[in-house]
Structures are given as C-alpha cells and as structure tokens.
C-alpha cells in the first residue's frame, strides 16, 4: 500500500483542485480524504507538491526494433517515467516498420514488462511507402491504438481517403505528418531569415499548410478522427480551427519546442534545434499558444526523437532531425504556458493527460476512487536543471536550462517507477 499525504490533488477529469490524501492498494486508488491513515502503507509526504494523473505522450519514438543504439523500450520507458509519463504511444517508423500483425504483437509482448504503459501504433501504409494500406482490420484486432505514417507525409489522396473511411469504420484515429516535399528545399529549418543567413534552403510553412487544408476537408468528408501531428504553422492552426467549427473530428498536437522556440534557436543550438517540421517565427509560436488556449490544439506531445551524439555532430544539412523531450516536457509546459499566464495548471494537465487518452480511446488517468493508480507528483515552482538523462540520448536544446516543475515521483499501476 501507498499513502500520499497532504498533496494538492489537481485532476482535469474530475475538476478537483484541493489538498487531499490518496491511499493506494495494489494498482488502484482506494480512498481519498483528509487525515487518512494506513499503518501498513508506505508513506510519501507530498506537502507542498502536486498530485496529478500520470501524463500521456501520444507521440514518441523509442526506436525499437531496429535503431536501439539511439533508444529502446527500456530506456524510453525510463525517460518517460522520469518525465512524469505513465503512458506513451510509439510511432511505427521502426525497422522493420510496424505494418503487420507479427511485428506489432512482438513489440507489445516486449512492452508488457516495461515499467510504464507502452502502446504501439500501426503504420497506415505498408513499409511507410504510401502505396498500399496495411491490413487495418488485423492491426485493430491486435489492439493497435491508432494508425500513423509519422515521419513521412501521405501524398496519395485516394489512399488516405480509403484509410480514413476504414479508420472511421474501426473507430480508431489517424495521425498525420504534414510536410509536402514540394515546399521543402532543405529539411529541419524554417524557410525564412535564419535559413537565408545560413544559406540553407529551409522548409516553407506552405509544406504544412497545403496538406493540413487537404486533410481537414477529408476528415470533414469522411467523419474520421484525425490528428494533425506536431503543428508548427500559424496558418495550419487557423485551418484546424475552421475545420473544427465546420464539424470535422479534427485534432492537433503541439510540442514544447514549437511553443517555446523560434527559428533563431538554430543559430544558438545548431543541429540540436533541427527538427521536422521546423520551429518557425515568433508569430507562428504565438499562434500555437493561442491554439492551445482556445482548444484548437488539444494535445501536447513531445515527438521524442532520440539520436546519437555522433549523428547530431554532423553538419546541419546531413544531421538527422528531431530532439528528445520526455524529461523536459512538463517543465516547459509550466515555464512557457502556465508561468506566463496562458494556461492554468489544470488546463495544461488536460492537454498532457486527459485529451491524448480520449483521442486514443483510452480511459484517462484520474485521481479518484477505483481508478488505476497512474500518478505524477511534482513541485510546480521548484526549479531544476536537466543535465543528465534516463534516455540514451541527450539531443535537446533544453539541456542545462533552469526550469520549474521538478518531478518527485511517478507511479504506474501503484508502483513507484521514478523517484527523485
């Protein structure tokens, strides 16, 4: 048994925000109240700390199988736990690609012994080639939570239309990477003042806008549940806002790097700030924040993308895109959004826990009796410096930043899977 004493419980599912004790037995919360006692329980003094539902990251790359020099299920799970996450959804761009039932079930079996909940998404197209759909019914039967070709845009409208219709029939979501190659002269950096200064072609926001417009209309037409992944363009935010008003079941993700950084970060951090889609202008960043505030963007994800130090040491044009993010996500949400008055902490937690769970047809983590004990315990104000990582990788511009939101414990199914 675990007894969490005197913490401030904040739960976006129940809308509770008050000082309470939480008693856990096995994998379940069995009692909430004040002045609780349980002589046989392990006591965690949470005075001055926040007790919240475990976070869910709906967009991570654990590189397993095929690229385990960068990350694997175990180190990815450790990084997630350190960041307060009790559930993650892994993308399908592994080697082999998760495009058939056997590879999906092999990953699921391996993930069963991880210390957090690891869900493995299915690819939409075989081999991520955008030519032929996977057997979506078989992948759904094997409990894939959804479908994505993340990392590669789906250019074939007929194929995507077929995928949306099938996903609607299966009541599972699609998540889409929106970058049309016609408008990407050089990946990872916004086409603008910084790319001009560096003599680097860059990726125009039109690459995203064009595909977001198309896919919002297709989502409206089919009724499919569709997520625009790692949104980066002010125009795309407005397109999603319009599609929602029109009645489309459309959703969008934002990453901490897209609501914290601008293209200028490339001048400071080099390849550590190279990512697809790129961080863009201050105007884009502010539009993303406005989208988070008004519900246009309904999920915060990390797009956790570990790479080796050697890979990121290459020149800008040949280094891989992507940054790690699990261990700094909550802190950046507090720093960039809550501390600056854009969101309440309750709203931030909904974006990082309840909303991703609902999109993926999961029961959201919640601090209430009979709920599974998936919990994060943290200090909102206490500052810390990320300089060592549980991930195999540390390719992040946020290393050595001073951030609020120090995590003390992560509990998954009643087990302490991270402690400070």
Image: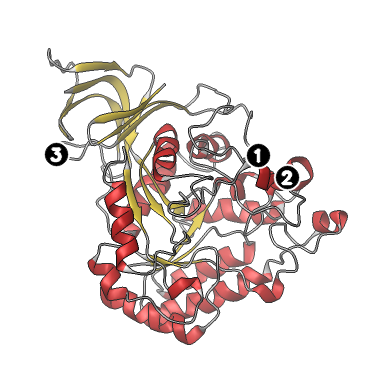
Return the residue at label 2. 265
Vertical placement of 388 versus 357: above or below?
Answer: above
User: Which picture quadrant has residue 195?
Assistant: bottom right
Binning the other alpha carbons within 10 Å of mark 3 as few (below 14), some (14 to 19) or many (20 upward) gives: some
Judged left or right of residue 47, residue 29 is: left
C-alpha gap between disc 1 and disc 2: 8 Å
Binning the other alpha carbons within 10 Å of mark 2 as few (below 14), some (14 to 19) or many (20 upward) gives: many
At 86% from the left and 59% from the top, the residue drawn is 199
Label 3 residue SS: loop
User: Which picture quadrant has residue 22?
Assistant: top left
**Residue 299 visible in the picture:** yes
Judge by depth and name the residue closer to the eye, 359 or 17. 359
Label drawn at residue 397? 1
Judged left or right of residue 43, residue 76 is: right
Q: Earlier in the sequence, mark 3 or mark 1?
A: 3
Q: Are marks 1 and 2 in contact (CB under 8 Å)?
A: yes
Q: Quadrant of the C terminus?
A: top left
Which residue of the protein is positioned furthest toward the bottom in this rendering? 158
Give coordinates of residue 69: x percent, y percent. Answer: 53, 45
C-alpha gap between disc 3 and disc 2: 45 Å
C-alpha gap between disc 3 and disc 1: 40 Å
Q: Earlier in the sequence, mark 3 or mark 2?
A: 2
Label drawn at residue 145? none
Q: Are marks 3 and 2 in contact (CB under 8 Å)?
A: no
Label drawn at residue 370? 3
Label 2 residue SS: helix
Q: Nearer the viewer, mark 3 or mark 1?
A: 1
Q: Earlier in the sequence, mark 1 or mark 2?
A: 2
């Amino acid at each position: 048994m675990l007894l969490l004493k005197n913490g401030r419980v904040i739960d976006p599912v129940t809308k509770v925000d008050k000082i309470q004790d939480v008693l856990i037995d096995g994998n379940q919360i069995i009692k909430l109240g004040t002045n609780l006692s349980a002589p046989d329980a392990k006591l965690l003094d949470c005075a001055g700390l926040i007790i919240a539902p475990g976070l869910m990251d709906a967009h991570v790359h654990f590189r397993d199988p095929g690229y385990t020099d960068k990350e694997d299920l175990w180190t990815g799970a450790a990084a997630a736990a350190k960041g307060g996450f009790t559930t993650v959804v892994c993308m399908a761009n592994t080697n082999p690609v998760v495009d058939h039932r056997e590879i999906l079930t092999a990953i699921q079996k391996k993930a069963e012994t991880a210390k957090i909940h690891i869900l493995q998404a299915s690819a939409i197209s075989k081999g991520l080639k955008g030519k032929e759909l996977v057997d979506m019914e078989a992948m759904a039967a094997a409990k894939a939570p959804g479908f994505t070709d993340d990392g590669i845009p789906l250019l074939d409208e007929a194929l995507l239309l077929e995928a949306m219709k099938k996903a609607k029939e299966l009541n599972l979501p699609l998540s889409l990477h929106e970058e049309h190659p016609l408008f990407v002269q050089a990946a990872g950096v916004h086409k603008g003042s910084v790319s001009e200064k560096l003599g680097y072609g860059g990726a125009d926001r039109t690459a995203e806008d064009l595909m977001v417009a198309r896919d919002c209309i297709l989502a409206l037409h089919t009724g499919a549940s569709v997520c625009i992944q790692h949104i980066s363009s002010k125009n795309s935010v407005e397109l999603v806002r319009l599609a929602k008003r029109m009645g489309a079941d459309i959703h969008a993700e934002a990453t901490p790097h897209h609501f914290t950084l601008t293209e200028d970060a490339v001048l400071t951090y080099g390849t550590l700030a190279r990512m697809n889609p790129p961080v863009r202008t201050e105007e884009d960043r502010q539009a993303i924040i406005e989208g988070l505030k008004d519900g246009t963007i309904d999920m915060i994800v990390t797009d956790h993308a570990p790479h080796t130090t050697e890979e990121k040491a290459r020149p800008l044009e040949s280094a891989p895109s992507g940054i790690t993010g699990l261990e700094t996500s909550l802190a950046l949400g507090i720093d960039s959004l809550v501390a600056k008055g854009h969101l309440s902490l309750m709203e931030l937690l909904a974006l990082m826990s309840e909303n991703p769970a609902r999109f993926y047809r999961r029961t959201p983590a919640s601090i209430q009796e009979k709920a599974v004990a998936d919990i994060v315990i943290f200090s909102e104000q206490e500052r810390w410096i990320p300089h060592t990582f549980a991930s195999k990788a540390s390719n992040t511009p946020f290393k050595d930043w001073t951030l609020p939101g120090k995590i003390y414990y992560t509990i998954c199914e009643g087990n302490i899977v991270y402690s400070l």
